[in-house]
Structure formats: C-alpha cells, structure tokens
Amino acid sequence: MEIDKAIGESEDKRLKTKYNNAIFVIRRALSLYSIEEVAFSFNGGKDSTVLLHLLRAGYFLHKKELSSSNGGLSSFPVRTIYFESPSAFTEINAFTYDAAQTYGIQLDIIRQDFKSGLEALLKANPIRAIFLGVRIGDPTAVGQEQFSPSSPGWPPFMRVNPILDWSYRDVWAFLLTCKVKYCSLYDQGYTSIGSIHDTVPNALLSVNDTSSKEKFKPAYLLSDGRLERAGRVKKNASVKNDVGSDSQKHEVLLASVIAVGDEILSGTVEDQLGLSLCKKLTSVGWSVQQTSVLRNDVDSVSEEVDRQRSICDMVFIYGGVGPLHSDVTLAGVAKAFGVRLAPDEEFEEYLRHLISEQCTGDRNEMAQLPEGITELLHHEKLSVPLIKCRNVIVLAATNTEELEKEWECLTELTKLGGSTSLMESKRLMTSLTDVEVAKPLSKLGLEFPDIYLGCYRKSRQGPIIITLKGKDNARIDLAVQGLCEKFKEGVFVDMK
Ligand SMILES: Cc1cc2nc3c(=O)[nH]c(=O)nc-3n(C[C@H](O)[C@H](O)[C@H](O)COP(=O)(O)O)c2cc1C
Ligand SMILES: Nc1ncnc2c1ncn2[C@@H]1O[C@H](COP(=O)(O)OP(=O)(O)OP(=O)(O)O)[C@@H](O)[C@H]1O
Ligand SMILES: [Mg+2]
C-alpha cells in the first residue's frame, strides 16, 4: 500500500505518530462495525482527502490481517456519501467525482440538508458509524472525541473522527509526503472551503503583485494553521481583541480576580498579585467585583470561573498554570466552558523554543489549551503569548514583576483601559466619629445615586477616609459640597 509505504519512509516523526493513531482509530471502527455498517462522509475538502487515503490504508491493513492476503486495493467498499449543494465550488465537485472514479468509490450523492439526508440514509441502510474529517479547531469539533455519538436531535449514529487531533500542518505534511492529488482550489490560496457564498482565498497568502489581478500562494504555505478559516466570510462581525462592546462603552466594566493556590490559603505564600491587579484595574476604570482564592482543584476553579464569567465583563485568573500536577487552572477554565483541553500547536511551538533542551516526547502537557475558545495574544515583549479564553484571561505571572510586564502587554493588546471611560475620584479625610457621619452619608448616597461612596478607617480611633467616585467630576464636586454643607466648616480635609 503506497500510503503506508510513504509514511513509513518519511522522517517526520510527528506525522508517523499522527498516522499510526488515525489508522488505529480506523481499525478499531472496522473491528467494531461491519463494512455495511460504516460510511465515509466525503466532500473533496483537504481534511476529507486525507481521510480518504487513511481509510483506504486502514481498510487494506484490516483486510490483510483478516485474510492474510497481500493483494492490492482496487476498490473501496465503504459506502461514501457526498452532500452535494448547488453552492459548492465547481472545482470541489469535479475533484470529488474524479477521486471517486480514481479510487473505485461508489459515491452516494445526497441532495438534502445534512440532517434530513442522514435520516433517509439511516432508514434505508444499516449504517451505525460515519467517518468524518473533522479536526480540532473546526467549530463543529468542540466537545467531540474520536468516537462521538451524533448530537441529540440528530439521527443516531457514531461519529468517527480519526484525524480529530491533526493540525493544519499535519494535514499538509500528509498530503505532500504521500504526493496525493487534492482539490486545485488549495493551490489558489483557499485554505478551508465552504460554499461559493462564504469562501474566498485566504488574504494571508496574498502575494503583492503589480498586475491588477491579486495572486495567492498555495494553502500549504500558510504558516499559522489557526488562521486557516480566515478565508471564510464571517457570519457575525469581526473578531475583537478589545474588551467591551460599543453598548458597554460608557458603562463601568466589571472584573473578577481569581487566585489559585493552596499555599495562599495555608498562609505559606502572600498573594501580592491580587492586590496589584486590583490597583491596576481600578486605575484604568474597571470595577473589581470580587477577588477569590481557590484551592488547586479543577472543580473549584471551574465552578468559580463559570460563576464569574457570567457576572463580569472580564475574569483574571492566575496561579496553577504550568505542567505540574497542581497546575489545574487551564483544566478548570476548559471545564467551566464545557470544552476539553486540546493540544495547541502554536503554543507548543513557543514552549518548545523556551524549553527546547528539556522537552521530551512529542507532547508537551503545557501546550494543552481549552479547545475552540482560546485566543493567543502575542506581544514581542513576551516569550509566551497571553492566554485568553473568551472573557477569561489566564495570567502566567508568579510575581509582581512578571505581572507588571504581562499587564503592560495586555493593556496594549486589548485596550483594557482605552475602551472604558475612566472614573474620576476624590478622597476626603475627617476626624468626625463614624456615628456622626453615618446618617448624612447615607442621605448623600440617595441624593447622588450616580456617585459611589466608600469609607474606611486606618484604625478604630483614627480618622475616616471617604472616597467619592463617578464619571463626572462636576457631580463629584457637587456631592462633596453637599456633604460639607451638612457639617461645620473645615471638618473634611481633601486628600486629592
Ligand atoms: C455526516 C455528518 C454528520 C453530522 N453529524 C452532526 C451531529 O451529530 N451534530 C451536529 O450538530 N452536526 C452534525 N453535522 C453537521 C456538522 O457538524 C456541521 O454543521 C457542518 O459540517 C458544517 O457545515 P456548514 O458550515 O456548511 O454549516 C454532521 C454533518 C455531517 C456531514
Ligand atoms: N457536503 C459534505 N458532504 C460530505 N461530507 C461533508 C460535507 N461537508 C462536510 N463534510 C464532512 O465534514 C468534514 C469537515 O468538513 P470541513 O469543511 O471542516 O473539512 P474539509 O472540507 O475536508 O476541509 P476544509 O477545511 O479545507 O474545507 C469533512 O471532512 C467531511 O467528512
Ligand atoms: Mg470544507
């Protein structure tokens, strides 16, 4: 079998591992289900094309083991389904039909939507499992395993995803190493192909050319595989790096700060990062709603993150980030969002640079990130990008110096401060007793509902410090004036 031979002869260790794992999944499926009970969902895309060749190789190896025959593979008996749509690219249709002919595949063309088509297919055939070329990073891969039952509301069958853990680069390494044909659109800058209405060549492959027609490099030259869908026209708005939508622009943004560390709870280590973060957030106009310290425990983290992410605009979490057994923060964040941790090739690359000589094996546990929700925020000053999972920022800092650097980069990258309207504030000190100020202060609160009034004392007998905060300086001045009028002159000292 030429594919098995090509991979065997390749020196790409990673590709060999991916290939062997995929073949293992295929052979497991072929042992669990009879050949009449399986189907292959083929659409001429690159992932589908990889799967076609893996399935042929897997089937060949499976058959060889059963019959100890050494013959070639002239036909491929796995039922192959193609959902043909009027909005498919002609190149995709042509490639799909061509491949079927080349490899002796009997194509079942379905001209219905996925769900209805599958319902009819399963009614008419004993199919129990369907092979798909779904990969981590695809929007539909979230929550899937290599064997995943179809979703509730879909006809019942097993989705088999042999290349779920393959990266964009793995796909191209396979297609190029095996020298197999793929759809011509990939050589014209298309990196992921949907319909003619939502797919254009990937702008990241654009070649600056003086002639009027824009040219593109082939898909396999895209260096950052995470951007393979950049050629898909987005259904809803653009990806934003800045926090706070326009509707929130004039509201105070709410933050929650979470520390993870048994050592903080036992008093062994003092948490200085929380204090520093609260100061920083406040200084750029955020309102910190809560700080919490959690045990190094996945469920504690997931429950707290889940709660805070729905209440606050942004959650900042630190501690418990790394490869140790106690480093559970990312697992907790993943669980809070109902996704799993999955290897992130790009992050792995950064870590490899950082700890290259200590890196053993082909998997780095630290490179596992919450799947489908993670955005890496790069900054030239950081050796490893910051991790942002929707509205949760995972900080790797372990001391205030490191935090300082991460914060600086974060504010530059996300406009943390720029998108919010800064709060104005004033502080007053008085030696009046708390009994004397209590009532007038609560009255002031009712008169100025838009002004935040905070009080604290440095000691039981010492002076009281009153903070007034709001978005409008004039309103703060008015509140201060209102407060002073309730007392004798000179009892409040302006602390600036
Ligand atoms: C064979 C097959 C099985 C599918 N099974 C499911 C499923 O179990 N659950 C689900 O939500 N979507 C299922 N889908 C739909 C895909 O997840 C996804 O919606 C589709 O591939 C995306 O195509 P689109 O971008 O054209 O909408 C299935 C699709 C195919 C082709
Ligand atoms: N119209 C379709 N007919 C049959 N199978 C399909 C169809 N659309 C999607 N699939 C299945 O879903 C998988 C994932 O689709 P997806 O579009 O992500 O990958 P692809 O088309 O193989 O490659 P690309 O990401 O380059 O478009 C396919 O590999 C295929 O198994
Ligand atoms: Mg596709």
Image (spheres, grey):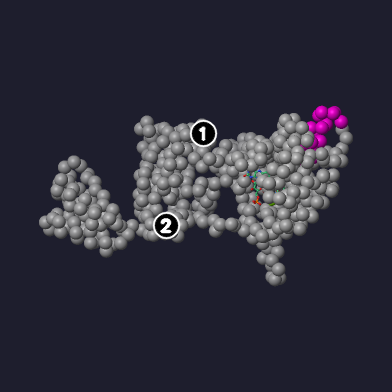
Measure the C-alpha gap from mark 2 to mark 1. 38 Å
Numbered disc in front, either 2 or 1: 2
The residue under the point 54% across, 49% down is 375
Q: Position of residue 201 (x, y in %)?
A: 68, 59
The residue under the point 82% across, 45% down is 106
Image quadrant containing the N terminus: top right
Magenta stretch prevailing secondary structure = helix
Residue furthest to the right in view is 71
Q: Position of residue 471 (x, y in %)?
A: 32, 59
The residue under the point 72% across, 33% down is 29
Residue 186 makes an appearance in the image: no
Near mark 2 (Cα within 10 A), the count class, few <14, some 14-19 or many ≥20, is: some
Residue furthest to the left in view is 488
Label placed on residue 96: none
Q: Which residue carries the number 1 mark?
A: 324
Q: Which residue carries the number 2 mark?
A: 248
Near mark 1 (Cα within 10 A), the count class, few <14, some 14-19 or many ≥20, is: few
Count every numbered label the image shows and give the total.
2
Residue 344 found in image quarter: top right
Q: Position of residue 217 (x, y in %)?
A: 70, 59
Tell me which numbered mark, 2 or 1, is placed earlier along the sequence.
2
Tell me, yes or no, whether the highlighted magenta stretch contains residue 55: yes
Image quadrant containing the C terminus: bottom left
Which stretch appears magenta? 54-69
The amino acid at mark 2 is: Gln
Please indicate whether residue 429 sits to the left or right of residue 192 in the image: left
Secondary structure of the residue carrying tag 1 is: loop
Please indicate whether residue 41 sits to the left or right of residue 380 in the image: right
Secondary structure of the residue carrying tag 2 is: helix
Q: Position of residue 112 (x, y in %)?
A: 71, 50
